[in-house]
């Protein structure tokens, strides 16, 4: 199908001349309009790829037409034709989003060249927009990497659940991707354009979690100097993800149940209730049925959360997927650290597949990230993974080694990563994995330290285990 240009000029002789010239020389279909109002009507019934419009017309001016077009089709190129003495006005059009302007009288070759470039520009923009959309669509399909029956079943279940708006309970061991599953449900749902608010319940002190979730009024308690909206309100229209829901207190369980039942909440210190539109997805690594039987978790809340249940499998159940997952992490970290692509040696891959991953994909992810940072060659070798402590700095770390073969930004990024790994690892070794004490020793906030640890794949459990093994 030929591309189509809309020519707008109140002089019909001019529009017919331009149509013949552009149609013949550039092999385009042309649509003519003698006013801005007619041009907008033509755009409703035609797929237009470029607009060539005169500045000065009775009724709607070229500037007004430009604004109307940009409001409806921001990427559509508009070329303005103007008299030689009105160049300042043409420049104003450029500021409003016009692709270019042509002064009358114009050279035919100059006009054709400008139209040709405008069409190429539009085609490039459309191609990029199509590619971005394909990448977004692809990203929605590739939250989980794997070809095993369990992973395929998981993805199928998530896609089905995402079409609904029911509450979901995600179960699975630590490090199996429960938050990833929640994110995928949200992204594939009708709420995808709204907030996704994750809450790590055990990470927030019990005395603070209630006010964080529901918000509070000024004066509700000591220190409440202003009104504050809670995380439920922050997630309005979207999804609230409650991670490790099994750790919340009995009193908070009762208040959460009421919110889920009534779809309304009351701020601490307030008497009025507020309607909310939030989808709740909860996750746990515990056997909540056992907690219910033991009286530690409310049965009515459990069944309210478990309208639909999704289980994320541990790596030991999907060993055939470990190579794909490992390759995904390797590519991700090489790109993230601005390093040239690396590969696994055959022995290293065999080791990764055969090893027991108690921390599942998160543990595998952390170890691959450390190996990428400390490896010297193009291949990650088996010895890079055989002993976790081998990937950590020695008891007396030296200065991070600088690779002067890298570009400045790449070398700085890699050196900073090595420094953080060495410093934080030694800090946690000295405190035997106590994150709070490590943060206090480093004189930084605990949350800041946790952020650094997550960024560089540092797991405090490694240091606690190391301390337990000491005689």
Image: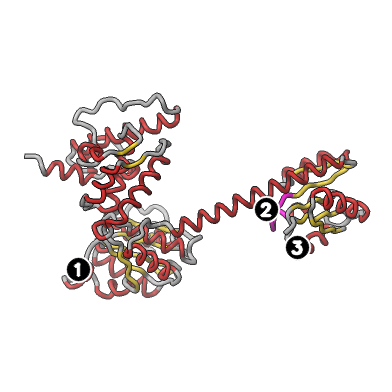
Q: Whole-Å distance between the Cαs marked 2 and 1?
A: 56 Å
Instruction: Tell which tag, 2 or 1, sits nearer the viewer.
Output: 2
Label placed on residue 291: 1
- Which residue is pictured at 90% across the width and 41% down the height? 105
- What segment carries the magenta color? 69-77
| Label 3–label 2 contact, CB within 8 A | no
Q: Mark 1 packing: few (<14 Cα in 10 Å), some, or many (20+)?
A: some
Q: Position of residue 338 (x, y in %)?
A: 43, 36
Task: Decide which of tag 3 and tag 2 comes sooner along the chain.
Answer: 3
Instruction: Give the answer, above or below, for where 382 lies relative to 242.
Output: above
Label placed on residue 46: 3
Task: Decide which of tag 2 and tag 1 comes sooner along the chain.
Answer: 2
Q: Position of residue 116 (x, y in %)?
A: 76, 45
Q: Position of residue 56 (x, y in %)?
A: 87, 49
- Farthest residue, direction right: 13
Residue 56 magenta: no
What residue is disc 2 on?
74
On the picture, is 138 further left or further right than 300?
right
């Amino acid at each position: 199908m030929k591309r189509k240009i809309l020519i707008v000029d109140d002089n019909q002789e001019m529009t017919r001349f331009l149509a013949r010239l552009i149609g013949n020389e550039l092999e385009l279909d042309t649509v003519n309009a003698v006013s801005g109002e007619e041009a907008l009507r033509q755009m409703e019934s035609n797929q237009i790829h470029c607009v060539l419009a005169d500045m000065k017309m009775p009724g709607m001016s070229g500037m007004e037409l430009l604004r109307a077009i940009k409001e409806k089709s921001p990427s559509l190129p508009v070329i303005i034709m103007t008299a030689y003495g009105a160049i300042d006005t043409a420049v104003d059009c450029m500021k409003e989003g016009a692709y270019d302007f042509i002064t009358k009288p114009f050279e035919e070759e100059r006009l054709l060249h400008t139209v040709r470039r405008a069409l190429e520009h539009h085609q490039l923009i459309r191609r990029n927009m199509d590619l971005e959309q394909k990448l977004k669509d692809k990203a929605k399909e590739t939250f989980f990497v794997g070809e095993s029956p369990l992973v395929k079943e998981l993805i199928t279940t998530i896609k089905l659940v995402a079409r609904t708006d029911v509450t979901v309970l995600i179960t699975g061991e630590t490090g199996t991707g429960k938050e990833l599953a929640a994110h995928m449900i949200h992204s594939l749902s009708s709420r995808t354009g709204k907030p996704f608010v994750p809450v790590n319940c055990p990470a927030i002190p019990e005395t603070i979690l209630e006010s964080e979730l529901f918000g509070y009024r000024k004066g509700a308690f000591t220190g409440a100097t202003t009104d504050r909206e809670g995380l439920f309100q922050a997630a309005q229209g979207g999804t609230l993800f409650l991670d490790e829901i099994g750790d919340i207190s009995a009193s908070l369980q009762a208040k959460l149940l009421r919110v889920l039942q009534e779809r309304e909440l009351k701020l601490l210190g307030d008497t009025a209730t507020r309607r909310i539109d939030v989808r709740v997805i909860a996750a746990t690594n515990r056997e909540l049925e056992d907690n219910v039987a033991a009286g530690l978790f409310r049965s009515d809340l459990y069944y309210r959360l478990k309208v639909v249940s999704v289980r994320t499998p541990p790596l030991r159940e999907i060993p055939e997927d470990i190579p794909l997952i490992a390759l995904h992490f390797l590519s991700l970290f090489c790109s993230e650290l601005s390093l040239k692509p690396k590969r696994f040696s055959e022995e290293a891959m065999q080791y990764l597949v055969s090893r027991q991953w108690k921390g599942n994909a998160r543990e595998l992810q952390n170890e691959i990230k450390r190996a990428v940072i400390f490896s010297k060659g193009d291949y990650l070798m088996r010895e890079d993974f055989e002993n976790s402590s081998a990937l950590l700095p020695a008891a007396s770390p030296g200065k991070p080694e600088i690779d002067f073969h890298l570009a400045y930004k790449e070398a700085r990024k890699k050196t900073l990563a090595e420094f953080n790994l060495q410093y934080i690892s030694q800090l946690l070794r000295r405190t035997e994995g106590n994150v709070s004490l490590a943060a206090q020793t480093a004189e930084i906030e605990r949350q800041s330290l946790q952020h650094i640890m997550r960024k560089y794949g540092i797991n405090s459990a490694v240091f606690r285990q190391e301390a337990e093994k000491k005689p």
